[in-house]
Amino acid sequence: MQALELKVPPALLMLLFGLMMWVIDHLLPQLKQDWPWHFWVARGVFLVAMTLIATGVYGFRVAKTTVDPTQPENASSVVTSGVYRFTRNPMYLGFLLILVAFMVKLANPLNALTVPLFVFYMNQFQIKPEERALLRLFGEPYSSYLRKVRRWI
C-alpha cells in the first residue's frame, strides 16, 4: 500500500470525500433527517475549520517552510508555535472539520461513515509517511515534538 503514500493531496482527498457524501445523500435521500439547527451548526464548524487551515498555513509561511504535503522532505523547519502547540496537523484537522460541517449540512446520518474513513486514510497514507520523513530530516527535535503534541487534537 506504499503506492498510496503521499500521492493524493489532502485538499483533493477532502473534496473526493465530500463528493462521496454528496453522492450518498443523493442516492439515499430518504435517510435525510429534519434537524432545524443543522445549517447553523454546519456554518460554525466550517468557520472553525477555515480558521485552523488559515492559521496552519500562516505558521508555515512565517517559518518559511513548504506547505506542499506531498513532499515533506522539502521542509526547512519544524513549526511548533501558534496552532502547532495544540495539534500537529491543523490543516488536516480543518479538512476533517469541513467534512463534518458538510455532513451536518446534508443531514444524512449515513455520511457519518465517511468521516472515520477520511481519518484512516490520512493517518495511513499521509500523516505517518510525513512523520517518517520529518523524523529523518529533523531527528530529535521532531521526535520531541511528536511526544508533546497530539496528531489531531
Image (spheres, grey):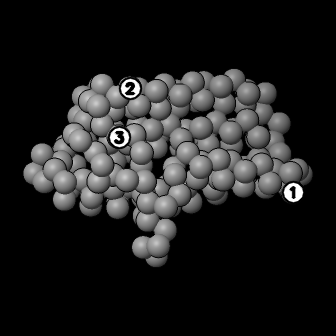
Q: Which three-letter amino acid code belongs to the residue tagged 3?
A: Thr
Element under disc 1: helix
* Residue depicted at x 22% and y 40%: 77
Query: Does the rendering let one see residue 19?
Result: yes
Q: Earlier in the sequence, mark 3 or mark 1?
A: 1
The circle drawn on residue 66 is 3
For the residues labelled 2 and 1, say whether their Cβ atoms are less than 8 Å apart: no
| Horizontal arrangement in the rendering, residue 106 relative to residue 46 (left or right) | right
Please say if 41 is above or below 151: above
- Location of mark 2 (residue): 58
Q: Please give the count of numbered marks on the rendered protein.
A: 3
Say few, some or many: other residues with alpha carbon within 10 Å of mark 1 (under 14 / 14 to 19 / 20 or more). few
Spatial CA span between label 2 and label 3: 11 Å
Say few, some or many: other residues with alpha carbon within 10 Å of mark 2 (under 14 / 14 to 19 / 20 or more). some
Query: Does the rendering let one see residue 52?
Result: no
Q: Which three-letter amino acid code belongs to the residue tagged 1?
A: Leu
The circle drawn on residue 27 is 1
Q: Quadrant of residue 124?
A: bottom left
The spot of residue 80 in percent (x, y) is: 23, 34
The spot of residue 83 in percent (x, y) is: 33, 29
Residue nearest the observer in this picture, 86 or 13? 13
Which is more foreground, mark 2 or mark 3? 3
Residue nearest the observer in this picture, 46 or 62? 62
